[in-house]
Amino acid sequence: MAKKTKKQLSLVDTDALLKTLEARFENNLIRHKNIEWSKVLVRLKANAEKLWTLNEMEKTDGEPDVIGQDKKSGEFIFVDCAAESP
């Protein structure tokens, strides 16, 4: 079994976060034209530390969402899209 790092969510928390991120993604398609959720999901599932960071944003009432993709690295760019930042 892989060693669990401090910055790794439980399976339950991961599932809940991914559902929240997907709903936000689907509700705000104008923010990420030409980006497919399935591709974002694959990247997120492969990087536990990034999921942990996005979860921390959620815990502080942030609303992380995809706004683009880096052309060189292929990484998706998330920013806090909350109407008011805490």
Image (spheres, rainbow, N blue to C red):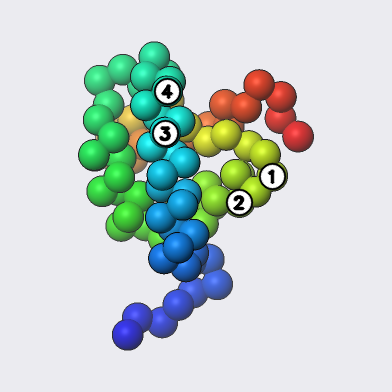
44 relative to 3, above or below = above
Q: Name the residue under label 1.
A: 60
Q: Residue at x 60, y 44 (%)?
A: 58
**Callout 1, which amino acid?**
Thr
Contact? badges 4 and 3 (CB < 8 Å): yes
**Callout 3, which amino acid?**
Ala
Mark 2 → mark 4, Cα distance in angstroms: 21 Å
Mark 4 → mark 3, Cα distance in angstroms: 6 Å
Answer few, some or many: residues within 10 Å of disc 4's Cα (few below 14, many 20 plus, some between 14 and 19).
few
**How far across and down, in percent of the image, does residue 80 sit?**
58, 32
Of the two numbered discs 1 and 4 in the rendering, the one whose residue sits closer to the viewer = 4
Q: Which residue is drawn at 45% across and 30% down?
A: 24
Say which quadrant the N terminus sits in.
Answer: bottom left
SS state under label 2: helix
Contact? badges 1 and 4 (CB < 8 Å): no
Residue 23's disc number? 3
Query: Looking at the image, is mark 2 or mark 3 earlier in the sequence?
Result: 3
Toward which corner of the image does residue 62 lie, by quadrant?
top right
**Callout 4, which amino acid?**
Asn
Contact? badges 1 and 3 (CB < 8 Å): no
SS state under label 4: helix
Residue 56's disc number? 2
Residue 73's disc number? none
Residue 43 seen in render: yes
45 relative to 37, above or below = below
Toward which corner of the image does residue 75 lie, by quadrant?
top left
Contact? badges 1 and 2 (CB < 8 Å): yes
